[in-house]
Amino acid sequence: MKQHKLLALIAASAAAAFAVAGEVKESGQFATLDADHDGRISATEAQHDAKTAGAFVAADSDQDGYLSESEFDAIKTPEGAASPDATTDGDSTDGK
């Protein structure tokens, strides 16, 4: 019985480690794509991520040929989703 509990604990620990690793990858993706470490992503660097490459021109809001970290973050935030710095006051706007 102790072996089953130990195996369950190991499995749970492994699952948690994979979840954390996924978060680190996502949060570090800008740095990973910024291969020359100049604080921006060029069109060439963007080619290493299909979603970034496909949205590059539209996301380059200042049209300087590079994505800043905020321009890059806009690509990664799903349309219609609240941005991380958005605040709500909890009031309903549906009239109910």
Image: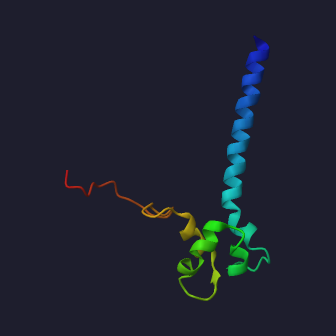
Say which quarter of the image contains residue 74.
bottom right
Asked if residue 19 can be seen in this view, the reply is: yes
Residue 51: % across, % down: 61, 67
Furthest toward the left, the residue is 95
Asked if residue 42 can be seen in this view, the reply is: no
Q: Residue at x 55, y 86 (%)?
A: 62
Residue 22: % across, % down: 69, 50
Q: Residue at x 75, y 10 (%)?
A: 1
Image vertical order of residue 85 relative to residue 47, above or below: above
Say which quarter of the image contains residue 71.
bottom right
Q: Nearer the viewer, residue 5 or 60?
A: 60
Q: Nearer the viewer, residue 52 or 34?
A: 52
Q: Residue at x 38, y 59 (%)?
A: 88
Residue 86: % across, % down: 45, 63
Image vertical order of residue 79 relative to residue 16, above or below: below
Q: Is residue 28 left or right of residue 90?
A: right
Q: Residue at x 73, y 26 (%)?
A: 9
